[in-house]
Image (spheres, rainbow, N blue to C red):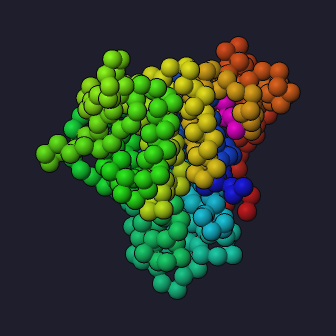
């Protein structure tokens, strides 16, 4: 089976509540921890990369309250944010992308360092930027760069760096909002579902034209999760659009039609999760799909169907899921290696693989992940947490 892993490793320094972390990701990774532990902050670090590349770095920071709200503010921590991603591109090549953003005395910021390498440092296309100056590059010509923007945006105009830009900007991040999905929507680009589902009608319309088999699959799973729903489709309402559902009603010969504004939060959220997971098609497919608490508002009986979708999609697209639901994780077949434990200690978020005791219980099928979660026995590996605290001689290109 082809490995769908796009982001193989994530190293963060001083991002929001995360002081330091070094995490390996799998095709399907569950970030498990209590509310407030900081699971969302880990996903937001990846979302931040996408936002800074698809828009501008300034907008990405502003949407999060500025650099002072993004970087971790506590004694002993640096005044910069560092992100390093080890990647695997569609053609099988490995790649690395990393940058460090620091605060300036005048309250502004600068990209202190930025590095990109495909196929290993010195083995393929690469560049290194320091404070708006090109220090090294494999290319004879390189576009102009400035210290207030990520250079990859400009470098994406060069054919050799385009694959890494396209992959990073094709990541999808979701915290579906039924209220937004319920409202009439303006027709938009439907290739990629937006974070809260604000263009879901356009996505459904796009799938009907470009990948009807995917829309059929969404409807099939929707019937499994919400048995009364027979199907849904996009419906035009003047210059706007919405979703129309066909629902079985007792005593009625034919299913009744209901617009999205009449549907429950659970139904809309289930549809949003399924659409986020199954939106990939020949026209456009996400490199990574990250969903926050997909089980929210779903009946526990639907957990099995949701797990099935997650497992099937992870064969083609990397999937990250945050959860604190024992029902979703109540499956003996969930691999211990796919679980990242997230805890908060003294206001700091810490992430690590499960400790050996938890892993042994799972591998011996003594308990499921969900059962250990109910017993509060999913513990992070303390040795891994301690290793993350050790000083690194060079943040960028660790291990190369």
Q: Quadrant of residue 252?
A: top left
102 or 227, nearer to the observer: 227
Quadrant of the image containing the C terminus: bottom right
Q: Name the spot of residue 152 as percent of width and height, x first.
A: 47, 66
Residue reaching furthest left? 238
Q: Residue at x 56, y 58 (%)?
A: 98
Q: Answer whether residue 379 is magenta in the image.
A: no
The rendered magenta stretch, by its main secondary structure, is classed as: strand
> Considering depth in this image, is 187 or 344 the residue closer to the camera?
187
Q: Is residue 339 left or right of residue 73?
A: right
Q: Residue placed farthest to the front in the image? A: 253
Kindly indicate the quadrant of the structure image that contains residue 283: bottom left
The part of the chain drawn in magenta is: 338-342
For residue 224, above or below residue 91? above
Which of these two is toward me, 165 or 107? 165
Q: Position of residue 43 (x, y in %)?
A: 52, 40
Q: Is residue 389 left or right of residue 294?
A: right
Residue ID at (49%, 78%): 159
In the rendered view, would you say 2 is above or below 360?
below
> How many numbered marks are there?
0
The vertical placement of 89 against 365, above or below, is below
Along the horizontal axis of the image, is 15 left or right of 186?
A: right
Q: Residue at x 39, y 53 (%)?
A: 207
Residue 131 appears in the figure: no
User: Which percent across, then down, holds residue 354?
Assistant: 74, 31
Taking the view exactly as shown, the residue that stands out farthest to the bottom is: 140
Placement of the N terminus among the 4 image quadrants: bottom right
Q: Nearer the viewer, residue 310 or 14?
A: 310
Q: Residue at x 67, y 35 (%)?
A: 340
- List x then y, in percent, for residue 125: 59, 75
């Amino acid at each position: 089976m082809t490995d769908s892993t796009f982001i193989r490793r994530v190293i963060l320094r001083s991002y929001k509540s995360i002081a330091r972390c070094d995490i390996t990701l799998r095709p399907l990774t569950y970030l498990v921890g209590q509310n407030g532990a900081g699971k969302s902050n880990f996903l937001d670090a990846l979302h931040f990369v996408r936002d800074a590349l698809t828009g501008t770095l300034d907008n990405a920071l502003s949407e999060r309250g500025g650099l002072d709200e993004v970087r971790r503010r506590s004694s002993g921590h640096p005044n910069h944010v560092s992100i390093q991603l080890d990647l695997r591109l569609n053609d099988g090549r490995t790649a690395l992308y990393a940058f460090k953003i620091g605060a300036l005395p005048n309250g502004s910021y600068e990209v202190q360092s930025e590095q990109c390498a495909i196929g290993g440092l010195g083995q393929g296309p690469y560049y290194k930027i320091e404070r708006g100056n090109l220090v090294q590059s494999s290319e004879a010509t390189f576009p102009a760069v400035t210290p207030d923007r990520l250079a990859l945006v400009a470098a994406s105009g060069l054919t050799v760096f385009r694959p890494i830009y396209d992959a990073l900007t094709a990541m999808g991040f979701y915290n579906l909002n039924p209220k937004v999905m319920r409202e009439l929507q303006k027709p938009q680009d439907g290739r990629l579902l937006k974070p809260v589902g604000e263009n879901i009608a356009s996505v459904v319309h796009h799938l009907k034209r470009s990948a009807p088999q995917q829309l059929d699959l969404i409807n099939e799973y929707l019937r499994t999760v919400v048995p009364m729903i027979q199907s849904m489709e996009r419906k035009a309402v003047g210059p706007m659009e919405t979703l129309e559902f066909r629902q079985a009603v007792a005593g009625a010969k034919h299913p009744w039609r209901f617009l999205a504004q009449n549907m429950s939060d659970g139904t809309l959220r289930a549809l949003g999760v399924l659409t986020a997971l199954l939106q990939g098609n020949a026209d456009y497919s996400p490199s990574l799909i990250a969903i926050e608490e997909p089980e929210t508002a779903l009946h526990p009986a639907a957990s099995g169907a949701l797990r099935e979708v997650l497992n099937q999609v992870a064969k083609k697209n990397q999937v990250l899921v945050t959860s604190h639901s024992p029902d979703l994780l109540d499956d003996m077949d969930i691999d211990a290696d796919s679980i990242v434990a997230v805890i908060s200690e003294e206001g700091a978020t810490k992430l690590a693989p499960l400790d050996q005791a938890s892993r042994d219980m799972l591998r011996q099928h003594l308990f499921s992940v969900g059962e250990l979660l109910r017993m509060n026995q999913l513990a992070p590996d303390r040795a891994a947490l301690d290793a993350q605290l050790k000083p690194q001689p060079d943040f960028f290109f660790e291990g190369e």
